[in-house]
Image (tube, grey):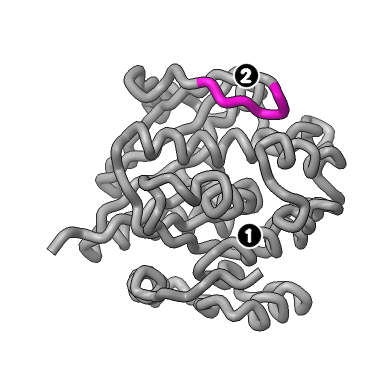
Amino acid sequence: MEKKRVLFVSQEIQPFLPETEISKKVRHLPQGIQEDGKEIRVFMPRYGCINERRHQLHEVIRLSGMNLIINDTDHPLIIKVASVPAAKMQVYFIDNEEYFKRKAVHTDEDGAFFDDNDERAIFFGRGVLETVKKLGWTPDVIHCHGWMTAMMPLYIREMYGNDPHFADTKVVYSAYNKGFEGELDGNLQKKLKFDGFEDDAIAHMNKPTMEALHKLAIDNSDGVVFGSEELNNDLESYINASEKLFLPYQGDESYVQAYSEFYDKVIESNSVLVD
């Protein structure tokens, strides 16, 4: 029987970034899922604060060299990879000089949110999908972690929906408490329209707050995971009313097996996405 394939996409992963709820989960979850008999691939952004020498990152020449057009501008896509020896797994990094060279993650030295975080998120998500295609590796499930991945379900469903490579791929989104204050760039809707999205598909981005991103991701996913033990009441109600398959929060002692079974359930489901 062919192994099921799970693609993990996260905005942060240990040991490349400090421990957070997300980085810790996505360090151990892929390892556990791999040990449970599934095939995995793991992606994250190559932020400039990641020490390439310490973590032995190196460029994958055969995967690099593509250009992605973001907001009508060409941006070269560079792919790097590093190993997590203790986990016997590799992590692929999406890199770009303009978006990820700066020595920070999402905020500057004064704690101000970067103005182009919306474009960085789009570049990251599209970069993952284009790289997976180039790898010739077809995922059964794509599991998105963190707000930087929240637009990926939209892209998978709308932009890549007719691509044979992702025709049968299901999307799972984990909703976490960690996010940001305020809004992403006010021109985000216009940038998404440039990529061909219709108004109704991106209505949530009229005011691109953290909660709006969550809702956009939920609308375009096949399954939703409560990544944090507590979510705000409005978001929790939105998930419960969405008619999506969902997995309640799982503690450290049980989450790997629960997630693995949830992936199987999502793969086998024939549910129609409900907006």
Judged from this view, the residue extending furthest toward the left is 1
Between marks 2 and 1, how big is the CA–CA gap? 26 Å
113, above or below 271, in the image: above
211, above or below 150, in the image: below
Residue plotted at (84% across, 48% down): 183
Residue 108: percent from the left, percent from the top?
A: 77, 31
Residue 118: percent from the left, percent from the top?
A: 72, 39
Secondary structure of the residue carrying tag 2 is strand
Number of other residues with Cα within 10 Å of mark 1, as a class: few under 14, some 14 to 19, many 20 or more = many
Answer with left or right where residue 15 lies relative to residue 72. left
Residue 36: percent from the left, percent from the top?
A: 24, 65
Residue 207: percent from the left, percent from the top?
A: 85, 53
Which labelled disc corresponds to residue 74? 2
Q: Earlier in the sequence, mark 2 or mark 1?
A: 2
Residue plotted at (55% across, 64% down): 221
- Determine which residue is flagged by label 1: 217
Number of other residues with Cα within 10 Å of mark 2, as a class: few under 14, some 14 to 19, many 20 or more = few
Answer with left or right where residue 106 lies relative to residue 34. right
94, above or below 138, in the image: above
Residue plotted at (54% across, 38% down): 126
Which quarter of the picture shows residue 5?
A: bottom left
Q: Amino acid at mark 2?
A: Asp
Residue plotted at (51% across, 34% down): 127
Which quarter of the picture shows residue 243?
A: bottom right
Q: Main secondary structure of the magenta part?
A: strand
Secondary structure of the residue carrying tag 1 is helix
Task: Give the residues drawn in magenta, as a range.
Answer: 67-72
**Viewer-proximal residue among 225 and 254:** 225
Answer with left or right where residue 59 lies relative to residue 212. left
Could you tell me which quadrant the C terminus lies in? Answer: bottom right
Q: Amino acid at mark 1?
A: Ala
